[in-house]
Image: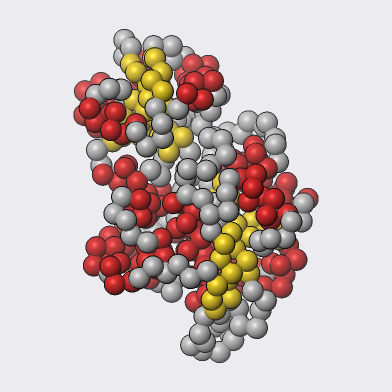
Amino acid sequence: MGARTSRHGPRLGALAALATLLGLLLAACGGGNSRSSSATSTGGSAVLPGLGKPPLTLGTKAFVEEDILGELYKQTLEAKGYTVNYKPNIGATEVIDKALTSGQIDAYPEYTGESVATVARLSTIVSTAPREYNLAAAFYAKRGQAVSSMTPFSDTDAIVVSNAFAKRHRLTMIADLKKLRHFTLGAESAFLSRQEGAAGMRSKYGLTNFTLKPLALGLQYQALDVGDIAAADAFTTDPQLASGKYRLLTDPKNIFGFQNIIVVIDKSKLAQLGGQTFMNLIDKVNALLTTPAMTAMNKAVAVDKQSPGAVARAFLKANGVI
């Protein structure tokens, strides 16, 4: 996937409630974009574990999905009495990791694959999401940081086709593309040489029957719609996937790796904030973040132009977090 600079958990009833809230409540919710605030007490310290604790400086990268994640954590913590100094749009993996290690921020959400490949600079190939998580957690522990549990959703590269094309050619997984005489694949140029890309499709699935059509991120769905390409490289939480018009082909050999979200936090700050009591709040949010839930929220912000703060608030209320 490279350094990201662009870009059953919640029960079905909660997802339905989210959809209703997004349609009926978000216009009235406001921006929710305050950079620093603390919750007003609505009870004793036993129910507001953040009261009296030092402030947390939380950072995020510079794309929609991270904007939403930052608001989810910020609002959850503030509801429990914590003071959160929120610093969004810091930059790519290398930039935000430096902000963490230099003490400019205390914590931020990171993708496990990015942690392993870009931060730790490990070339280890893994076959499961827990293994990717364990590699990341071990690296951070040696460096003085702790990590949360990982989210159910993993925002990885994936091959997507239109539903009509999938039905016509009986496509359900990447290997099924071998049935085609030839097809055009839309992706960024760099995708061609990556093992977590076209090179892996060739070596792991034996696919040699395609031509790459270079496309900038965001243009691949339009190209699919008009028939300029038959398949495209996409991310598994792209908001366009919420339309139901496309099918993600499964990747049983995991050539695209794993990119689940973890929150990385300085160990000394974690202790000051309450240790596991604090981390339990982060883990509660993470457990709700399935692919359908994250895709729906990405769509609400990127396509429907709602604010990340309002979308996060609706989701947290729908799931009884705040």
Q: Is residue 66 left or right of residue 315?
A: right
Q: Nearer the viewer, residue 39 or 251?
A: 39
Identify which residue, 294 or 127, lies in the foreground.
294
| Residue 14 location (% of width, % of height) | 33, 63
Using the image, determine if residue 305 lies above or below residue 31. above
Q: Is residue 182 above or below residue 191?
A: above
**In the rendered image, the vertical position of residue 211 relative to residue 2, given as above or below:** above
Percent across and percent down for residue 188 are 45, 27
Residue lying at 63% horizontally and 69% vertically, measured from the top left: 56
Q: Is residue 10 left or right of residue 82?
A: left
- Measuring from the top left, give residue 248's x and y in whole percent: 35, 34
- Based on the displayed image, in which of its 4 quarters is residue 241 positioned? top left
Task: Name which quarter of the figure residue 106 lies in.
Answer: bottom right
Decide if residue 80 is in sight here: no
Residue depicted at 41% across the width and 48% down the height: 291
Give me the residue at 67% from left, 76% from top. 54
Whether residue 134 sits left or right of residue 29 in the image: it is: right
Question: Colour mode?
Answer: secondary structure
Question: Residue 205, image x and y in percent?
Answer: 47, 19
